Image (spheres, rainbow, N blue to C red):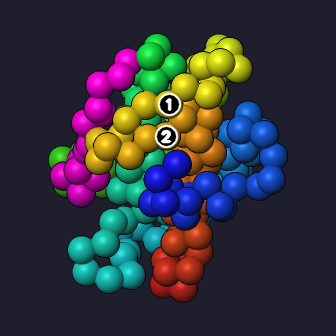
Amino acid sequence: MPEYFDRYINLTDDVTYMEALEISLKELENAPINKWKALGDKVYAPGKWTVKDILQHYIDTERVFTYRMTAFARKDQQKMLGFDEDLYAQNAFANRRTIEDLLEELILVRKGYIAMYKSFTPEMLQLVGKGYNGAEYSVLAMGFMVAGHQRWHFKVLEERYYPLL
């Protein structure tokens, strides 16, 4: 697993990958929508994303990782393409959407991610593919990475955005 992903994986509970994903789904379903709405377009520093941008980033990242996970599980050995998260955010126009709309889409994407994970055999979970930078990681690791990625951003919201309220 690339060290870069450790910061996400280390935020998950000491549970199975499926439990980590289910917990992350529950955290989304119980999201503090009122706080997010109260933040509106506030950011803690110039050039930082709004809450809506962060939610769109979750959605985009999860879709990118769904593709990678599928490719690895199907033994595709080509190096995956990277994605420019700032370019995606700039061109998604998330701020024209509602918090509820973004959250609904994210929950649907997460449920699809979980459904796909349930379809994998133990052997598929151990398969390894090449990330965009040549680093290798497993299908199993991506489950923990997605759950931890969400917590990473929830932590940023708590520490840097909620004090703006």
C-alpha separation, residue under disc 1 versus residue under disc 2: 5 Å
49 is higher (above) or lower (below) than 45: above
Magenta stretch: dominant SS?
Answer: loop
Q: From which residue to which does the magenta span run? A: 76-88
Q: Which residue is mark 1?
A: 128
- Relative height, residue 140 to residue 54 (above, below): above
Residue 149 at x, y percent in the picture: 53, 54
Rendered location of residue 12, percent (x, y)? 70, 55
Task: Provide the secondary structure element on which disc 2 rests.
Answer: strand
Pointer 1 or 2: first along the chain: 1
- Residue at image point 41% right, 57% down: 54
Tag of residue 108? none
Residue at coordinates 37% horizontally, 75% vertically from top-left? 42
Most foreground residue, 97 or 1: 1
28, 34: nearer the viewer:
28
Callout 1 touching callout 2 (CB < 8 Å): yes
Q: Name the residue type under label 1.
A: Val
On the image, the x and y values in percent for residue 67 come to 40, 26
Query: At 53% across and 71% down in the image, what residue appears?
Result: 157
In which image quadrant can residue 62 be found? top left
Residue, x 78% and y 40% (percent of image)?
A: 16
State the residue in front, 42 or 22.
Answer: 22
Residue 21: in magenta span: no
Q: Is residue 155 left or right of residue 90?
A: right
The residue pinned by badge 2 equals 137
**Res. 131 in view:** yes
28 left or right of 163 in image? right
Find out whether residue 79 is within the magenta segment. yes
- Rendered location of residue 56, percent (x, y): 38, 47
The answer to which quarter of the image holds residue 8 is bottom right
Q: Amino acid at mark 2?
A: Tyr
Up-down relation of residue 94 to residue 6 (above or below): above
